[in-house]
Amino acid sequence: MPIYNYECMNKQGELITGEISAETTAIAAERLRASGYAVLELVEYKEKKKSSFLSNEKKVKLSDITLFSRQLAAMLSAGIPVTRALFTLSRQAENPTLRNALETISKNVEGGMGLADAFSAFPDIFSKLYVSMLKAGEIGGNLENTLLRLSDQLQKEKQVKDNIKSATSYPKMIGIFTVVIFVAMLVFMVPTFQGFIPESAEIPGMTQFIFNVSESVRTRWYIWIGVIGVITASIVLFFKSKTGHDLWENVKLKLPILGPIMLKSVIARFTRTLSTLLEGGIPVVQALESAGPTSGSDVLAETVKLATKRIEEGKTIASTLEESEVFPPMVTHMIAVGEESGTLPSLLDKLAEFYEEEVDVTTKSLQSLIQPVLLIFIGVLVGGMLVALYLPMFTSVAAGS
């Protein structure tokens, strides 16, 4: 959503500047006028994209937003005005990016802008889900409870991400370690062994292949680096393109071993988000439209998008989701029970807890399974190279005897 820099005059005749997020310039101007401002200047903000290496902005983590939400809820429940609470928290925030954002939000809210509109000016920090929940909390007059629900949602989301990250971090480390050991053996150990082999010895094909690779790595290393760089860049660019992204989205949930883990984490995030939105008073269709994209899967988001159209035609949530092959029967059955009994938010919470525990258990068991498999793989790789290097020596000794 575009962001606009504005310069306005408030009812007291003071000059107010800030940022506002809106679909169009006309909508932004209308929101400012509705807040009691006289619009003097309204210009769309074009952000200059910087490389992540050159950017000085520190990324705002989920833990930062979770802590901020809990602190703001506590201050509001203590009777502190929202503008004062935002100003205080902006001074306390350790993350400089979040601090600057909160300072701007505090000024905008103090100038008369709505709380949700002020937060929506920072879409890179506060998601659409966050802004939608704030808007519902403002309208319903239960902003403190809404913020607490948001912080719980963000905390659960962080736990799921941490579980998946912990399951994949060990294979990544082992993979890097394996590559380093393999290259070191090719560069330093293979030439040493090659010097011990008599010229008259018959060199097996596998050993000769290792010698050739070693010589190539040592003498033409720049070609290897260039080829590996080109291949890596091509893969990254392909998966960043629309074709590659769509291909990955359609394949990743069907991958062996990792696919079920990803599907469970996606369903956990979707059901948790949908429950939070429904408990916050968001209408069903709007809640589904917001929860789908935040699930982390384009396939699930598209399925939910199609389901919303069927719901508007009078269908139930469970019947529309059941038609897709994305959601397991347990999910649709629980949703059906929740719709019939009027306890949909609480049942969605239970579903989210179940799948979050499943992700936790599965990732831990997967990690315990991957460790010995990777160690065996490294042993076979290193051992195979050593056998290939010693084989000419054994052949020479056998021939001499």
Image (cartoon, rainbow, N blue to C red):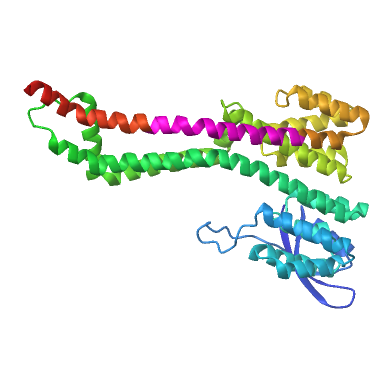
Relative to 220, residue 120 above or below? below
Q: Which of 140 and 344 is in front in this view?
A: 344
Q: Position of residue 180 (x, y in %)?
A: 36, 43
Total labels: the figure holds 0
Where is residue 254 drawn, in percent x and y? 60, 26
The residue positioned 64% from the left and 33% from the top of the image is 361
The percent position of residue 109, horizontal first and vertical second, equals: 83, 66
Most foreground residue, 120 or 393:
393
Residue 101 in view, yes or no = yes
Q: What stretch is highlighted in magenta?
A: 352-378
Residue 130 vertical position relative to residue 237 in the rendered view, above or below: below
- Magenta segment main secondary structure: helix
Q: In which quarter of the image is residue 120?
A: bottom right
- For residue 395, side relative to residue 93 (left or right): left
Nearer to the camera, 156 or 41 = 156
Q: Which residue is drawn at 82% across and 53% down?
A: 147
Residue 373 drawn in magenta: yes
The residue furthest front is 401
Asked if residue 53 lies in the magenta stretch, the reply is: no
Left/right placement of residue 29 relative to residue 201 reads right
